[in-house]
Amino acid sequence: MGSPALEVDECGTSSGFGAPRASDRFHPMAALPPRRQRKARKQVLAANEVVLYTNLHIAIQRILQLLERGDKPAEAAAALGATTEDPVTTDSFTRVRSYMSGSVPQSFHSALDRAWPAKEGYGAHPSWWTDHFPKRAKYSLPSSLFGALKAADSGTAGLIAALQQYYSSAAGGIQAEQQERLSQSKSSLERSTEMVRSRDPQIRARVDAIAVDTLQLLDWTVSRAPCHEFEIAVRIATDYLPHTLQSYLDVPAEQMPIRTGGGKSARDLTLEQLDLIGKAVEDASDNHATVEASKLLANQRFLEDRFGGSSLDLPK
């Protein structure tokens, strides 16, 4: 049993978490509502399944970092199991370590397949499991991840190479998808500006300004995608802006009051909606700038702690 949306072999999710990275925090799971609340229970379960697979990819990439640092697979699994705040990861990778270090040592891929998520040895699942998943639920490793692990050459070096290849391929696929969405968004913005080229000058000016700001936001954020600001820019370019303009163009007399519009004309209502869209672009751009500034300040603090004095001073 696993969510169909979670064929996380591509290491991305449709949940809003985006592509999991080793630097991400593990996502918390929500407690399942009572059985009588079927709809809410189904929604929470779907979200928990996304978290389950997202956290798996975060954990595997942290294992990769430990392997690259020089740890053995069993040591890396033990270190991860001892430090993570996610109960599935803690239990699963603690078991991976014991399976790899037992009297009949298991390979990493077979130990992980046997342990994740805590498949064996419980009889009755522990309280944290039944709080978040159905008692009889089983979740398999993503097939292409398991295949990559199983096909790895023997030894730590082979495992490192297999994981590096798996995640670099996943990242490349995600980036290619974002570039395609970027191209579609830019084309949509061009069509939007053409839609009102011969219309009211004020509406034309608003649309042109939104297009310029949205293009800038798209170019800023595509390399960070999937991210919230990139998604906002894509939605504005391909959905909100063209639909707003099409609704405006479908009204035969743009200056006449609309009966259901509080006495405002189509032009007035469209200008108000364009203002809302423009504000959304502005807010997303400000948020992106704040994130980038925070990264710069964090880097400055690291340099100052590392070298002392000015962050631009070279160490003696």
Image (spheres, grey):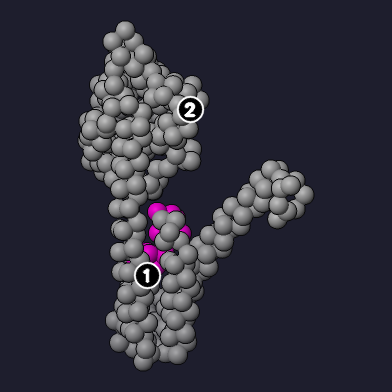
Kind of residue at badge 2: Thr
Establish if 53 lies above or below 205: above
Identity of the residue drawn at 62% across and 55% down: 296
In x, y percent, where is residue 118? 33, 20
Q: Secondary structure at mark 2?
A: loop
Point out the tag, 2 or 1, that comes first from the N-terminus: 2
Q: Tag count in the figure?
A: 2
Quadrant location of residue 253? bottom left
96 vs 49: above or below: above
Above or below: residue 190 compared with residue 90: below
Check residue 231 for magenta coloring. Answer: yes
Query: Dot 1, how many residues are within 10 Å of its Cα: few (below 14), some (14-19), or many (20+)?
Result: many
Tell me if residue 84 can be seen.
yes
- Per the picture, the main secondary structure of the magenta-coloured stretch is helix
Counting from the top left corner in percent of width and height, residue 151 is at: 23, 33
Whether the magenta-drawn stretch holds residue 163 is answered as no
Residue under the image location 36 percent in, 35 percent down: 160
Q: Nearer the viewer, residue 156 or 178?
A: 156
Tag of residue 203: none
Residue at 48% over, 41% down? 23
The front one of 185 and 20 is: 20
Q: Amino acid at mark 1?
A: Ala
Name the residue beneath numbered marker 1.
Answer: 237
Q: Which residues are magenta?
A: 226-238
41 vs 185, nearest the viewer: 185
Q: Nearer the viewer, mark 2 or mark 1?
A: 2
- Left or right, 280 with reference to 167: right
Callout 2 environment at 10 Å: few (<14), some (14 to 19), or many (20+)? some
Residue at the extreme right: 309
- State the separation of the CA atoms marked 2 and 1: 40 Å
Q: Residue 207 location, x and y as percent?
A: 43, 80
For label 2, the residue is 84
